Image (cartoon, rainbow, N blue to C red):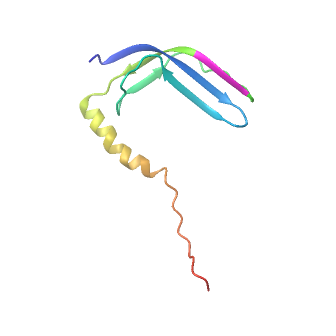
Amino acid sequence: MARTVETWCQVSVSETVENLYAHVELEEFLDLAPGDQVTVHGQPIPTGPGQVTEERRRVTIVRASWIARVWARFLSNFELLELFEVSFTDRRKL
């Protein structure tokens, strides 16, 4: 397997009332794994309020080494905890 892969992608950026997102979809199937680095080339895509913009861009994927994959999996367990919001409330009636 090659350590660096060059390919193309479709970038979609939306700044509407309903959606605020930036999606990248690779044009060919590549099995990405933890620790792989994906770099989309080019200038930032200008999008104004109420607009959806799509562009075809070149993308470089650098495959992680096996130790980097293990490390990324290990760290992801802790980073996932940052997504949880926990609230402790007293639900007893006084």
Residue pictured at 43% horizontal, 24% vertical: 38
Name the side, left or right, on which 57 lies relative to 6: right
- Give percent across and percent down for residue 56: 56, 14
Residue pictured at 27% horizontal, 28% vertical: 65
- Give percent across and percent down for residue 43: 58, 17
Q: How many numbered markers are drawn?
A: 0
Quarter holding residue 54: top right
- Quick check: can you spot residue 47? no
Furthest residue toward front: 29
Say if the magenta span includes residue 31.
no
- Give percent across and percent down for residue 80: 43, 48
Between 37 and 16, the one nearer to me in the picture: 16
Quarter holding residue 51: top right
Quarter holding residue 70: top left
Name the side, left or right, on which 83 lies relative to 50: left
Q: Which residues are magenta?
A: 51-55
Q: Main secondary structure of the magenta part?
A: strand
Furthest residue toward bottom: 94
- Give percent across and percent down for residue 59: 46, 17
Quadrant for the C terminus, please: bottom right
Between 36 and 18, the one nearer to me in the picture: 18
Between 78 and 28, the one nearer to me in the picture: 28
Quadrant for the N terminus, please: top left
- Quick check: can you spot residue 7? yes
Residue pictured at 71% horizontal, 32% vertical: 16
Say if the magenta span includes residue 52.
yes
Residue pictured at 50% horizontal, 23% vertical: 25
